[in-house]
Image (spheres, rainbow, N blue to C red):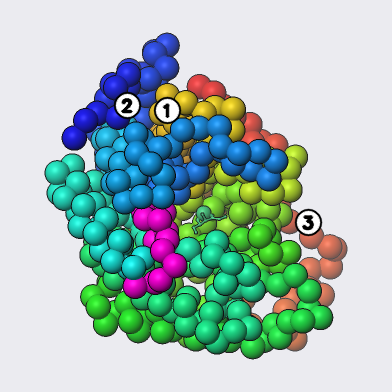
Amino acid sequence: MKEMFTSIPVIPYEGKDSQNPLAFKYYDADRIILGKPMKEHLPFAMAWWHNLCAAGTDMFGRDTADKSFGAEKGTMEHAKAKVDAGFEFMQKLGVQYFCFHDVDLVPEADDIKETNRRLDEITDYMLVKMKETGIKCLWGTANLFSNPRFMNGAGSTNSPEVFCFAAAQIKKALELTVKLGGRGYVFWGGREGYETLLNTDMKFEQENIARLMHMAVDYGRSIGFTGDFYIEPKPKEPMKHQYDFDAATAIGFLRQYGLDKDFKMNIEANHATLAGHTFQHELRVSAINGMLGSIDANQGDLLLGWDTDEFPFNVYEATMCMYEVLKAGGLTGGFNFDSKNRRPSYTMEDLFHAYILGMDTFALGLIKAAAIIEDGRIDAFVAERYAGYQSGIGAKIVSGEATLAELAAYAESLGDAKLPGSGRQEYLQSIVNQILFS
Ligand code: XUL
Ligand code: CO
């Protein structure tokens, strides 16, 4: 197999003073942080769709990047060239995992049986590469939003025939995920939502999504899938309103329909901010519900109201993300770069720069989050802030023994109104800055 990225070497770690654009400044795979090597804290994954497929087309213009990898697009030769390019790319960067949608892998045929045959062929080829390189699959998914038949959604469609096509794709994508040893299987809502309630039976649509997910769980377990299913919340785009609005909504949905034992969250940074939350908020909501599964590592632009899928460079956000991940004891999934280069950064070298940026940002986030935990001042402050609940009336409230009348009587006995302790937000923020910039 010929080398695709001939001008790019294996990316070395050179440390923070390096000026080499093709070197890591912070991601040092074997460096031990809190007792574990960085590469275990940060199971990075390449997103097949952004890396090997998307070439810059947007609403106003066509491709700027050449992702033909020396083959004619729309052919199986091209599908194979993408595999060659992808594995060389991951190996040169030390990325250990990949994520895929079914139709990222092969050109979709008119007949689903032919698409499935192509998928079998390409995944045989991928398995060979996986064995050669040790690179693994983080998660798989089915694209239930691009084909025109999914214009009204997949599980939420008004058409039972389209629902069956969705079932067929999920069945195959699950089989492929098992074949490739994927750790997880993702449901991003795609077009599961609505444009107007004038034509929408919201209750029925959500029940049908749950039916489809139950069938997926039953089938997945029956063919030996032992990993987690994930919902990837997103509040809008492409639909005006998406049902999996945010983590709290998705967790409520999973509990309502009895899916919570099999599913966790795949939290995407850009989706969090579209929902009006911080990335950290979505991670915390998932973690406290025992459902922090995996992360789509990217970044949005707060001045824009859509999903820009930028490579993450905000170290403050990455630090707060890694703080949540460390506190949650790690992920069962990993960090998938659901990110794309800006359209004018169209060369293959830019793709390497993008991953170096993303991986270094999360490495730095990990280092700084560990430092915040080791420093201990923030944890100590939070513990102290709630210390009143450890004894006296506070402990009685927590134990569930107290009654409303008893508490009212206690309040009367206090006389003067009592203020809670200061929140000390500015002090805590200055600790974070001190650690970030030291
Ligand atoms: C879309 C998105 C998807 C999912 C996988 O916003 O994030 O790429 O990650 O379907
Ligand atoms: Co995503």
The quarter of the rendered structure image containing the N terminus is top left
Residue 320, image quadrant: top right
Q: How far apart are marks 1 and 3 (CA)?
A: 59 Å
Of tags 1 and 3, which is closer to the observer?
A: 1
Tag 2 or tag 1, which sits nearer the N-term? 2
Residue under the image location 69 percent in, 49 percent down: 306
Q: Is mark 1 within 8 Å of ligand 1?
A: no
Residue 117, image quadrant: bottom left
Residue 288 in the figure: left or right of residue 141? right
Was residue 249 drawn as part of the magenta stretch in this picture?
no
Tag 3 or tag 1, which sits nearer the N-term? 1
Is 238 or 32 nearer to us in this picture? 238
Q: Which mark identifies residue 419?
A: 3
Q: Name the residue under label 1.
A: 348
Is 327 or 183 nearer to us in this picture? 183
Residue under the image location 23 percent in, 75 percent down: 224
Residue 341 is situated, as x and y percent measured from the top left of the image, at 53, 34
Which amino acid type is shown beneath numbered disc 3?
A: Leu
Label 1 secondary element: helix
Chain part drawn in magenta = 97-113
Q: Are marks 1 and 2 in contact (CB under 8 Å)?
A: yes
Task: Rate crowding at label 2 as few (under 14), some (14 to 19) or many (20 or more) other CA atoms within 10 Å.
Answer: some
Q: Can residue 95 be seen in this view?
A: no
Residue 107 is situated, as x and y percent measured from the top left of the image, at 40, 56
Residue under the image location 24 percent in, 46 percent down: 135
